[in-house]
Image (cartoon, coloured by chain):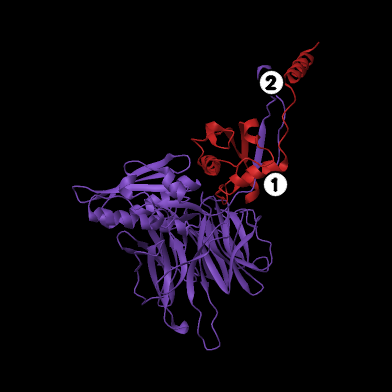
Chain colours: A red, B purple
Amino acid sequence: MNVLGRCSSVFLAATLMAGPALAAPTEAETNYVISQVHSGWLAIVGAQGVQPEAVDIALTMEADGRVITARLANSEDRYDGDARFRINADAAVRAVLRASPLHVPPTHPEFFKNNPEFIITFDPRSMR
Amino acid sequence: MTHLRRWFVPALLVAALISGPARAELNIIIDKGNAQPMPIAVSPLSGSVPEETQLGSDIAGVVAADLERSGLFKPIDRKAFIQSPDSLQQNVRFADWKLINAQALVSGKVEKQPDGRARVEFRLWDVYAEQQMVGRAYTAAPAGWRAIAHKIADDIYQRLTGEDGYFSTRIIYVAESGPQQKRVKRLAIMDQDGENHKFLTDGADLVLTPRFSPVQQEITYMSYYNNQPRVYVYHLDSGRRELLGDFPGMTFAPRFSPDGNRVVMSLAENGVTNIYEMDLRTRKMTRLTNDPYIDTSPCYSPDGSKITFNSDRGGTQQLYVMNADGSDQHRISFGNGRYATPVWSPRGDLIAFTKFDASAFYIGVMRPDGTGERLLSQGFLVEAPTWAPNGRVLAYWKQNPTDSKGHGGATKLYSIDLTGYNERQVVTPGDASDPAWSPLIP
């Protein structure tokens, strides 16, 4: 058996031992979360010479929707040296913290319990 | 638009999988934010005696006004503040500022020094991250309090937008008064917020087209003496005026090179107008264009390697770019209408211009290769764009039409953000034209 085959076997065994996978959030449930964060995201729309970039914010959540931590999850090394990137990252973290506690989607009461850690990507590139 | 980018079971995390329900990595993408102004609370700066308290209040007022005028911030009415300026010096109660929806907070204090100067300290806080973003102190004579306020506003703007500020600047312009047929035109200067206004000339001579040196607080302008155009250099710090020379046939005042050592200008002779460069140390003139057309309004790129100008050599007035030695002249504007008064952005990536098309004037910008034309402002007569030193804001002047009785025709200064939003009148005591924005005051 090759390496890939061994990994597949482990994956299959683990899946079987873990029981059924959790249901994926629906688009409506995701939109419910987005709508809460979106209103607090005040992106500074740049002018010429500024290329807006997406930033990933990693969240850890309580089951009731409280944000425990919100941290930059991509290009962390650029935060101190790249003022524009830092502005985008700060605005994204601020939006998440401002929205805390997030309301739990009514159709998915265990949304945050099932997703205690997830990533929100703030992408301002279509806002110019 | 929303996306569920990834929803999968990590194959190799066996331990995690066997301990409970399968976990997923959820990634939510938000690609529609708000381009609304950021709510910011600028608390009056604390002071221990009434004089310091008053100064702290005044400084906070100027900082808030600067930020508001940029269009990127929405200062919250200080009547809504829950925590007092003095209490802020002990600790920041972030919950109080979240309650009034402030995303950022400015606090600080004023201390009068034994030598009579004022030490002004400020801190910028991220209310939701509950962290200090920047803190700085300035010391100056109390009379310089407005300059300190503008420097604080520049610091805040820079930290929250990632772009340089532009509040510690001045605008020079031509102040106009009297009937349209006999206008009195004087040079005037003011801070970018309209304060500290003063006239530099008495109106006896006609003055036109003031231009700032990009590296020093000095200007050139054109004035008529015995019906001949003369160019002067005016040193703002000393008030000294120096004659650069008589230039018969000149139509616009020269513009400085980025290093301040050269000026570029257009001179008319025998029905044609060409562009010349003068070395200010040797006063040597070099002709850069040599053709039977009208080439005017030259302006250097910020690195000094190129010059943009307008010319009618193609049949209508259009924008051109050439190397600083006059080589490689090529047209960059190809839209409808006529283009004039090109001005290179301090950042180098855009050229602002005046455009006339279908009975209307416009202020617009395009890239130096002529692509990406955007029109920002329109009017009966809109003319003469000038860049703020950060390359984000433009100022220009507008004139209203006159009615059948000759009333109207008022000329006023305006500014606009490069996004095309936040057009505002720059208030002047009377009619105004031909603004020129200064570099940042050190």
The answer to whether residue B280 of the structure is visible from this angle is: no
Q: Is residue A19 left or right of residue B180?
A: right
| Pair 1/2: label in front | 2
The type of residue carrying mark 1 is Met
Cβ–Cβ below 8 Å for labels 1 and 2? Answer: no
Q: Nearer the viewer, residue B391 or B207?
A: B391
State the image coordinates of residue B361 (x, y, percent, origin top left): 60, 70
Label 1 crowd bin: few (<14), some (14–19), many (20+), radius 10 Å: few
Earlier residue among tags 1 and 2: 1
Q: Nearer the viewer, residue B321 or B117?
A: B117
Q: Which residue is mark 1?
A: B1
Q: Is residue B159 left or right of residue A5?
A: left
Q: Is residue B101 left or right of residue B375?
A: left
The disc at residue B310 is none
For this orientation, the residue located farthest to the right is A1
The type of residue carrying mark 2 is Leu
Quadrant of the rendered image containing residue B317: bottom right
Q: Is residue B185 placed above or below B285 in the rendered structure?
A: below
State the image coordinates of residue B290 (x, y, percent, origin top left): 59, 62
Q: Nearer the viewer, residue A31 or A92?
A: A31
State the image coordinates of residue B217 (x, y, percent, origin top left): 37, 57
Tell me the chain of label 1: B
State the image coordinates of residue B296 (x, y, percent, origin top left): 55, 65
Q: What residue is shown at x 43% (from left), y 75% (from top)?
A: B176
The disc at residue B17 is 2
